[in-house]
Amino acid sequence: MEKIPKKMQAVVLMGPNQLETKEVETPSPGPQDVLIKVNACAVCGSDVSLIEKPWEAQPPYGSFIIGHEYAGTVSAVGETVDEFEVGDRVAVEASYGCGRCRNCRHGNYTACLNYGNLKRGHRANGFTTNGGFAQYAVNHINTVHKIPDSIEFNEAALITNLGCILYGFQTIGGYVVGDQVVVVGPGPLGLIAVGVAKALCAEKIFLVGTRDSRLEMGKTMGADRVINVNEEDPLKVIREETNGIGADLVVESSGNVRGPQMAAEMSKRMGKILLVGYPEEPAAVNFSLLGMRNINIYAIRGEGWANCARAVSMLSKGRISLMPLATHSFPLANVKEAFKTFTERIGGAIKVIVHPNEV
Ligand SMILES: [Zn+2]
Ligand SMILES: [Zn+2]
């Protein structure tokens, strides 16, 4: 068995916009935890946001190891753990609910009412507890999923993204076979939403965006019709190509302040809107339109309802591939370059992966 070093390298948030790679104590697993040797940890828009401005219940600067999208190998197990063995290849999800609040008791652990309350047992690795931009990370077993050899670590690091979209599709009712689906915003989640809609047999999938390279990727993920808003009016195209009816489902993942209203205008009567991207400023939406057309809006946060397990299942059956999205990777020492590549989309970057144990 490989010896676990007492110290490890980790990316610590020292202050707003201050990331530092430094040596820290290697954590040890509690009775229901596993220690994971992290192979791959992906950069996410949420990381960028909380690096800029602290999120709710974030650990103090100087001790907080960020990163919530990661995968690796189990290198030690807690004293009660027999679900996992050293050497298992695994991927993680961020949230471990307290298990004792009303939402957790109903299975809604990503909406835990004790969010950030460590004493009551809630953890969200990379948000309220330490995460995966480190050589090792500790996870409660409920947040860990075994992955088959057919899933590469770079792809496994993205299961929370797929889990999040599956949770969204579950929330809106799950069933889009035969539907007209519009996805607005070809970011990582939007692109995955295209792939999920495809796998679930939507009739026609429209993808709306501004960048041709992202729209091309959308075609790879399964979009039937891409609309560049700089060249075409998306409302007109969708009206025309749905026989004047509108979309059954609009996935709003642009995070644009005009996104929710545009989604409402694209919806058919009795259509559904799934909000995945959120504008920073309050968005204006015409509620009369929502009411008169009987449109429902759904919002999701995180990868609830064990949808990461479903994500692993979907990936291992080859019903979707996230590999085209894993465009760039870097060793831990180059973490700042990794973030820059992600935020500035250098070289057409979509998802950027850091390999903490690569020197
Ligand atoms: Zn994320
Ligand atoms: Zn809870």
Image: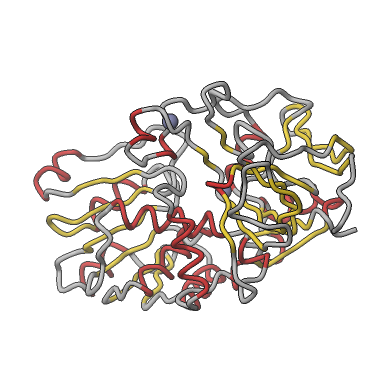
Residue 10, placed above or below residue 233: above
- In depth, the one of 220 and 80 nearer the eye is 80
Figure quadrant of the C terminus: bottom right
Which quarter of the picture shows residue 213? bottom right
- Residue 122 lies left or right of residue 153; in this view the side is left
Q: How is the image coloured?
A: secondary structure
- In depth, the one of 109 and 63 nearer the eye is 109
Q: Residue at x 41, y 28 (%)?
A: 100
Which quarter of the picture shows residue 331? bottom right
- In depth, the one of 256 and 168 nearer the eye is 168
Figure quadrant of the N terminus: bottom right
Residue 219, placed above or below residue 253: below
Query: Which residue, as the protein is rendered here, is positioned at the far left?
Result: 292
User: x%, y% of residue 312?
Assistant: 51, 65
- Residue 358 lies left or right of residue 78; in this view the side is right
Q: How many marks?
A: 0
User: x%, y% of residue 14?
Assistant: 78, 29
Q: Residue at x 48, y 56 (%)?
A: 308
User: x%, y% of residue 93?
Assistant: 55, 49
- Residue 129 lies left or right of residue 273; in this view the side is right
User: x%, y% of residue 130?
Assistant: 69, 36
- In depth, the one of 359 and 20 nearer the eye is 359
Which image quadrant shows ligand 2?
Answer: top left
Q: Residue at x 60, y 71 (%)?
A: 148
Residue 16, placed above or below residue 290: above
Q: Residue at x 28, y 70 (%)?
A: 237
